Image: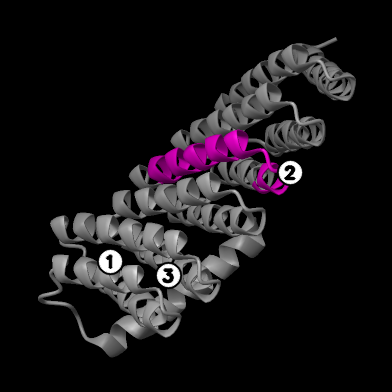
């Protein structure tokens, strides 16, 4: 038996072992399996780029997601956190090695698990996933991998929406702030679309919160937008800054409409704090921002 055959057999056995341990509720055993599957996946990432290695690595990532869903079903918190950590590490390694398709696969697996955890009320695990998504987004931004950064943002937006539906305020706030964190790191000419996208997604979350009359959540979004705007202003990222200002103005008007006075005042103060001197033509910005919204829709479909 060749070394490749031996490795593939070991991978299959480990996947089967992970599924069995998850079914039996063996949290420690599942944690060990995730560690082993992560190591196998990282090894494949560093091998020659062949169709066989690519398929093998994707199969491992899919298996990690399957086991992750099983431990979520059983509310196995430690094992669930291990699934987040392992998929996150695989995604980062793939991104660092410019293996974008594998990074996307791992990121998508992580994003779907994050939604699963929130849907089952696993607040601590969902917050851990939100932090990991931010780290992936920032790492992707540094590597100038726009699709990965934007997909991280999109999953954080979806996680915030799921947390809103499931009444998980801590997960909701974490997702919002981690989303803003990616936007703040994605400045510069090559990655500014990601910053613009973050502001657009934050506006959507703030709008949803305002329409529900949820004052604390609206204020969290306003604070996140102000922090994002300050960072964009500091880095002279004008296009993203104007979208941030538009988002704040939208939330100010909505807060007035729904009688959320503290949010109105918070938005006013945030707007006063941001310098929009030298902003490009509004019509050009509007067209570009519509293109970025469509870009988010496309990458989500591709994932």
Figure check: 50 above or below 209: above
For residue 120, the mark is 2
Residue with the mark numbered 3: 203
Which image quarter: residue 103?
top right
- Please say if the residues under marks 1 and 2 sit with CB atoms less than 8 Å apart: no
Please state if 229 lies on the left or on the right of 39 as rendered: left
Q: Which residues lie in the magenta part? A: 115-140
Figure check: 236 above or below 96: below
Query: Which residue does the image show at 57% across and 28% down from the upper left?
Result: 85
Seen from this angle, which residue lies furthest left? Answer: 277
Residue with the mark numbered 1: 266
Q: State the scheme by which the image is colored.
A: one colour
Earlier sequence position, callout 1 versus callout 2: 2
What secondary structure do most residues of the magenta stretch adopt?
A: helix
Q: Position of residue 197 (x, y in %)?
A: 41, 65
Please state if 184 lies on the left or on the right of 66 as rendered: left
Query: Which residue does the image show at 39% across and 61% down from the upper left?
Result: 221
Crowd around label 1: few <14 · some 14–19 · many ≥20 (10 Å): many
Query: Which residue does the image show at 38% across and 50% down from the upper left?
Result: 182
Crowd around label 3: few <14 · some 14–19 · many ≥20 (10 Å): many
Figure check: 191 above or below 8: below
Closer to us: 58 or 303: 303
Query: Which residue does the image show at 51% across and 45% down from the upper left?
Result: 170
Residue 120 is a magenta residue: yes
Which type of secondary structure does the marked residue at label 2 adopt?
loop
Look at the image and tell me in which quarter the N terminus lies.
top right
- Please say if the residues under marks 3 and 2 sit with CB atoms less than 8 Å apart: no
């Amino acid at each position: 038996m060749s070394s490749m055959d031996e490795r593939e057999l070991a991978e299959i056995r480990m996947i089967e072992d992970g599924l069995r341990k998850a079914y039996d509720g063996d949290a420690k055993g599942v944690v060990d399996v995730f560690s082993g599957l992560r190591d196998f996946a990282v090894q494949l990432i560093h091998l020659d780029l062949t169709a066989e290695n690519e398929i093998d690595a994707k199969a491992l990532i899919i298996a990690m997601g399957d086991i992750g869903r099983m431990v979520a079903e059983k509310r196995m918190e430690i094992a669930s956190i291990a699934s987040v950590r392992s998929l996150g590490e695989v995604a980062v390694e793939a991104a660092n090695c410019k293996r974008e398709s594998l990074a996307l696969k791992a990121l998508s697996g992580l994003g779907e698990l994050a939604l699963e955890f929130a849907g089952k009320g696993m607040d601590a695990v969902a917050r851990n996933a939100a932090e990991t998504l931010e780290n992936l987004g920032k790492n992707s931004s540094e590597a100038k991998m726009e699709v990965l950064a934007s997909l991280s943002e999109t999953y954080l937006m979806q996680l915030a929406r799921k947390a809103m539906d499931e009444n998980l305020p801590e997960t909701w706030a974490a997702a919002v702030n981690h989303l803003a964190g990616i936007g703040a790191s994605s400045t510069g000419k090559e990655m500014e679309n990601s910053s613009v996208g973050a502001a657009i997604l934050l506006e959507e979350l703030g709008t949803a919160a305002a329409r529900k009359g949820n004052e604390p959540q609206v204020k969290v979004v306003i604070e996140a937008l102000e922090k994002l705007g300050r960072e964009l202003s500091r880095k002279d990222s004008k296009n993203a800054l104007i979208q941030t200002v538009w988002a704040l103005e939208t939330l100010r008007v909505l807060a007035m409409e729904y009688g959320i006075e503290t949010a109105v005042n918070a938005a006013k103060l945030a707007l006063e704090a941001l310098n929009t001197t030298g902003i490009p033509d509004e019509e050009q910005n509007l067209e570009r921002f519509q293109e970025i919204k469509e870009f988010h829709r496309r990458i989500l479909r591709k994932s």
